[in-house]
Amino acid sequence: MGYLGEARTLWAVVKADAYGHGAVETVNALLPTGVSCFIVASLSEAIELRGAVREVSFRLMTLYPPATPQEWRAAAEYAIESVIDSPRAYEQARAVASSLNRPLPVHLEIDTGMSRLGLTPEEIELFLRVFCPDAPLEWRSVFTHFACAESDPEFTQEQLRQFLQIVTRLQACGFPHTPLSAAASAGVLTAPDSLLDGARIGLLLYGIAPAGQEAHPLCQRLQPVLRWRARVVSVRTIPKGRSVSYGAWFRAERPTRVATLGVGYADGYPIGLTNLAPVALHGKLVPQIGRVCMDMVMVDATDLPTVQVGDIATLIGRDGAAEVRVETLARLLHTTPHEITTRLGRRVGR
């Protein structure tokens, strides 16, 4: 909150079960700190979260625009703030609000380069032709979404310039002055002039750096909140030349002590990390060996002679001096940290 400033709104992004961390647990942890605005993707996520969290006064927004009048009515019933991303959605929201005889809380999204949701620059004039200042809609914000804030500052600045230009055009035609939002986690770090009236914080909320931003001073101050651990379920020593797991993708180059962990790709541990990932065990990093199985992962514990069944390995997080970062696993898979954490399955206790 201090980094953004007290005048700006922090929207905590808890979609996809809070990036795999547990949405209910995350919201319950954040509410006492003063965070009261949350974002999910879908209406079903929002309704589930609204019913599971005891505190009812928090604001809740969905990123998917409602597709039907029924969805608009459901959003109104559960006090969910919805996105308008097209002239059609605007007219649908206005009609539902009129039928309910009460204003609906809405956000207007502008597409400045993502090309997935939001009014395109070409649609602005069409939107203004159907826009009615007296319509029963309560505008909560106008926002856009950066495409590559972590990697392309010039394109990010062009998106910001276009967004502010469109907002100026809207306001000149009677659209109300509402809070403006452009930055998500990467934008907060790389484009501070895009903070405007608030920011939508996802990765940073969980202590994870956006790709390529690990050295940013703010990221250096953050601590990941996620630690993923698994129990050792078997320990055995195999001779030189023996294979490990399906496909014999690993063969021991020495007598090897294999520790098997009770976790696998059914729990969200990517099979792509086979023979690549470090695992923390007894305060040291040891290599994962053999193909990742549905329910089991093997590690080379040869240099840890005291490892035994029942010990705890750390797949993500710190164990003494050893640490496995989500960012490290993402680089090994040539993907984003988001994908790693959102893979975590329901079988993994939160």
Image (cartoon, grey):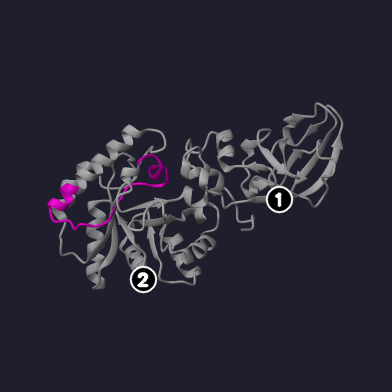
Instruction: List the residue tagged with mark 2.
Output: 77
Q: Is residue 170 magenta?
A: yes
Q: Residue at x 61, y 47 (%)?
A: 268
Q: Residue at x 35, y 63 (%)?
A: 71
Amino acid residing under circle 2: Glu
Percent of width and height locating residue 78: 39, 69
Q: What secondary structure is marked by label 1?
A: strand
| Residue segment shown in magenta | 168-191
Q: Quadrant where the C terminus lies? A: bottom right
Q: Residue at x 13, y 51 (%)?
A: 172
CA neighbours of label 1 inside 10 A, class few (<14), some (14 to 19), many (20+): many
Q: What secondary structure is marked by label 2?
A: helix
Is residue 317 depicted above or below 60 in this figure?
above
Percent of width and height locating residue 312: 74, 50
Percent of width and height locating residue 76: 33, 68
Q: Are marks 1 and 2 in contact (CB under 8 Å)?
A: no
Instruction: List the residue tagged with mark 1.
Output: 230
Left or right relative to 323: residue 61 = left
Q: Of label 1 and label 2, which has the lower sequence position?
A: 2
Compare residues 54 and 77 and report the one nearer the observer.
Answer: 54
Left or right relative to 1: residue 284 = right
